[in-house]
Image (cartoon, rainbow, N blue to C red):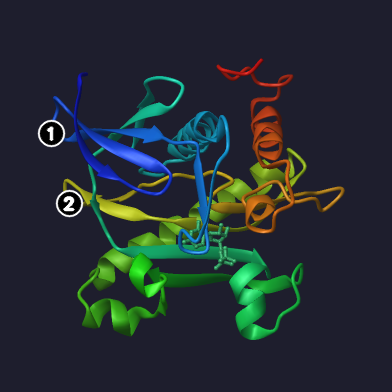
Amino acid sequence: MQKKDFLYEGKAKIIYRTDDPVHVLVEFKDDATAFDGVKKDRLEDKGVLNNRLSAHFFSLLEQHGINTHYIKTISDREMLVKSLEIIPVEVIVRNIAAGSLSKRLGIPEKTELKKTVLEFSLKDDELHDPMINHYHIYAMDLAKPEEMAEMERVALKVNEILVPYLKDKNIVLVDFKLEFGRHNGEIVLGDEISPDTCRFWDSSSGEKMDKDRFRRDMGGVVEAYREVLRRLEGGENPAVEGES
Ligand code: UDP
């Protein structure tokens, strides 16, 4: 596999072409952004941790029969993935009220939801990722009904797999965001699964172990990500290159 020209740079990742047209390389950056890029910082080693955390989650999901874009880890910051035609719909899965749901509906944070909630947003920074429903999705031809059915099925299955898996590591999976794409006519789970895209709370203390630490200026962001990785990998402090 040969890394070729730059394809696309997002807020936290850079995508490169490879010599194989059906595979691309994802490089995880240390950049952190929140509130549509208004708040920005560089968090040393975040990219390394998110590369490893995402690889861990994608491998786990593949073992459970989920079709993900993950192929293999290439380096500390890089993974090889299937090239997807991204569907511009973010799928949010919620188990406990937090963040925008609490604000929008007045449900106090930490309230356990009686039923898992699925939400959809249009992936568009300029429009601030507005929430949309199936009618908007079909009216804008963002995805077909059968594709939406598959995305919803997979999103709920991912939740069913991750909730008990994380509970066993003393982590509550509060909510998370998934992105999907098309590859060879199939719907494939793409993007990343990391503390940048999930809310993780320590089961005992309730302490936040995710990007909310950055959004809310709580400090200890990278330390929390490293602790999530330590719990997943079940070892001592995971070694991260560049760490003194
Ligand atoms: N999320 C994300 N990217 C987005 C919006 C949300 O990864 O553009 C994740 C977020 O980290 C959280 C979940 O989706 O785990 C629900 O986020 P929410 O709608 O509460 O928005 P926020 O409060 O993060 O603005």
Q: Residue at x 43, y 27 (%)?
A: 77
Q: Amino acid at mark 2?
A: Gly
Q: Local crowd at mark 2 within 10 Å, few (<14), some, or many (≥20)?
A: few
Q: What label sits on residue 185 in the rendered view?
A: 2
Q: Nearer the viewer, residue 22 or 222?
A: 222
Image quarter of the C terminus: top right
Q: Nearer the viewer, residue 191 or 40?
A: 40
Q: Nearer the viewer, residue 237 or 64?
A: 237
Circle 1 — which element? loop
Whichever of labels 1 and 2 marks the residue nearer the N terminus, that label is 1
Question: Which of the 4 quarters of the picture holds residue 130?
Answer: bottom left
Question: Which of the 4 quarters of the picture holds residue 138?
Answer: bottom left
Going by the image, does 194 lie left or right of 244? left
Q: Amino acid at mark 1?
A: Pro
Alpha carbon distance from label 1 to label 2: 16 Å
Indicate which label's residue lies in the foreground, 1 or 2.
1
Q: Residue at x 69, y 58 (%)?
A: 216
Q: Nearer the viewer, residue 160 or 37?
A: 37
Is 141 drawn above or below residue 61 in the view shown? below
Going by the image, does 71 lie left or right of 156? left
Q: Is mark 1 within 8 Å of ligand 1?
A: no
Residue named by callout 1? 21
Q: Position of residue 183 (x, y in %)?
A: 21, 47
Is 45 drawn above or below residue 122 in the view shown? above
